[in-house]
Amino acid sequence: MARDLYYYHYVGVYNNLTKDYKFYYGKNAFHRNSWPGPSPINVNRDLYISFGGRAGSYRNNVSININNPNKYTGDYSFLCISTSWSFYEQAISSINSLSLALTDPTLGNNQAQPVSVYMSSGMYLTVIPIRYIGSPATNFSIMLDNVHMPYEYDLPNYYIYFIDSGNSPNGNRISASNQFLMTNANIFYECPLKSLTISCLNNALGVKNTICTIIFGTQNPLKADGKIRLQFSGMTVATNICKFYHTNGSLISSTCSSTADNRNLTVSLSGW
């Protein structure tokens, strides 16, 4: 059963020049929701993100289709994306240069950069300020670079919604929203390792106890709190004790466990 959450929801702009905050949405507003985002009101099926590719990779030219029927000029509107993984990472992800060149609407100037924060319950919120200038199209697309794809092979939950400009007749409000709950199965795929070497202190047949070192390189970054599973053929795991090191030689906190037949080993990372 979903549990209703009560909280204040603020969206604003921080001016890098004057060092001032200006709140546009949510001030003195009280919202009742059952998840970390808006209720699915004013659902717009033309509001979505085009995902796909290698699980865990960083992708360029990730397209976001925006459909906002309420276009008000002169002040900031906001595209908000709530995801169950950190897909837009500060100082890594960015707005594509073609999207930065848009003149109507405009986005991503020095005083209104996108921001991504961790909210609660495993959800992240990304806010992209957008300003309509003259007579913009109702439907348009923007692109993001270095967007972190989820580690799952199916698309995890994400919610996308658009907040009107302060110049709208009703003030700042959610004018359009859409939600995707465990949709698009198998749109992400795995990829082979960059490198893999295994060496043991004693490689002779019949040796019952030896120490082996496995060195591998991945195409995509590892999940800091993820799990690595190793399947052995021709040898078995004799212990649940292992050590996991970074390429710089630093020890990474982890635990190991093996299956009953000692042919599969799982390394559980504790974050770093």
Image (tube, rainbow, N blue to C red):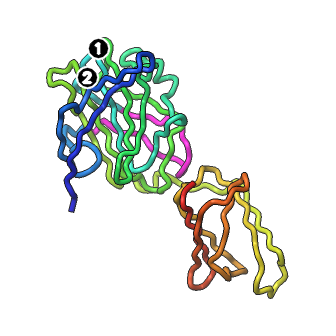
- Ranked by sequence position, the earlier of labels 1 and 2 is 1
Image: 144 above or below 39:
above
- State which quadrant residue 262 falls in: bottom right
Q: Position of residue 219 (x, y in %)?
A: 64, 50
Q: Residue at x 62, y 78 (%)?
A: 240
Q: Say which of 111 and 185 sits in front.
A: 111
Seen as rendered, the residue at the extreme left is 170
Query: Image check: 56 left or right of 64?
Result: right
What amino acid is labelled 2 in the image?
Answer: Ser
Q: Residue at x 67, y 80 (%)?
A: 237
The stretch of residues the image draws in magenta is 45-65
Query: Image check: 264 left or right of 107?
Result: right
Number of other residues with Cα within 10 Å of mark 2, as a class: few under 14, some 14 to 19, many 20 or more? many
Number of other residues with Cα within 10 Å of mark 1, as a class: few under 14, some 14 to 19, many 20 or more? few
What amino acid is labelled 1 in the image?
Answer: Gly
- Residue labelled with disc 2: 165
Q: CA distance from mark 1 to mark 2?
A: 8 Å
Q: Residue at x 39, y 50 (%)?
A: 84
Q: Secondary structure at mark 1?
A: loop
Image: 34 above or below 261:
above
- Residue labelled with disc 1: 74
Q: Secondary structure at mark 2?
A: loop
Which image quadrant: the C terminus? bottom right
Image: 134 above or below 6:
above
Q: Say which of 117 and 235 sits in front.
A: 117
The reply to whether callout 1 and callout 2 are in contact (CB within 8 Å) is yes
Image: 264 above or below 207:
above
Q: Is residue 83 magenta?
A: no
Q: Position of residue 256 (x, y in %)?
A: 59, 72
Please indicate, yes or no, whether residue 175 appears anywhere in the rendered image.
no
- State which quadrant residue 70 falls in: top left
